[in-house]
Image (spheres, rainbow, N blue to C red):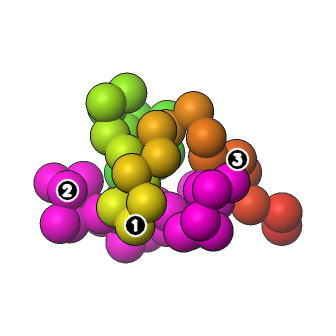
Amino acid sequence: MVTHVCTVCGYEYDPEVGDPDSGIAAATPFEEIPEDWVCPVCGATKDLFEPADL
């Protein structure tokens, strides 16, 4: 699974961790997060995330 980075604030969504505070379980790929999810740090929308460079 690929980590995605917020292009606004740099927050990294790690699918192995998820975003439990927002109800996103561990092992949830970025593509399966609901479209209305926002960055837990800055509130940026999902479309402002990009895959992290590997």
Figure quadrant of residue 1:
bottom right
Q: Is residue 35 left or right of residue 5?
A: left
What residue is shown with label 3?
Answer: 50
Disc 2 marks which residue?
22
Q: Which mark is residue 41?
A: 1
- Who is closer to the viewer here, 6 or 42? 42
How far apart are the alpha carbons under marks 1 and 3? 16 Å
Magenta range is: 1-27
- Give amino acid for label 3: Glu
Q: Residue furthest top?
A: 35
Q: In this view, does 53 lie to the left or right of 14?
A: right
User: Which residue is rendered at x = 39% and y = 51% of the image?
Assistant: 43
Residue at the (49%, 38%) spot, across then down: 46
Q: Where is residue 7 in the image (x, y as percent from the top left)?
A: 68, 54
Q: Earlier in the sequence, mark 2 or mark 3?
A: 2
Tell me which label, 1 or 2, sits earlier in the chain: 2
Secondary structure, mark 1, is: loop
Tell me the distance, in whole angstroms, between the alpha carbons under discs 1 and 2. 11 Å
Residue contact between numbered discs 1 and 2, judged by CB atoms under 8 Å = no
Q: Which marked residue is nearer to the observer: mark 1 or mark 3?
A: 1
How far across and down, in percent of the image, does residue 6 sit? 60, 56
Quarter of the rendering containing residue 41: bottom left
The percent coordinates of residue 54 (x first, y second) are: 83, 67
- Whether the magenta-drawn stretch holds residue 24 is answered as yes
Please, what is the dominant secondary structure of the magenta stretch?
loop
Along the line of sight, the residue nearer the viewer: 11 or 20: 11
The mark closer to the camera, 1 or 2, is 1
Left or right position of 7 against 14: right
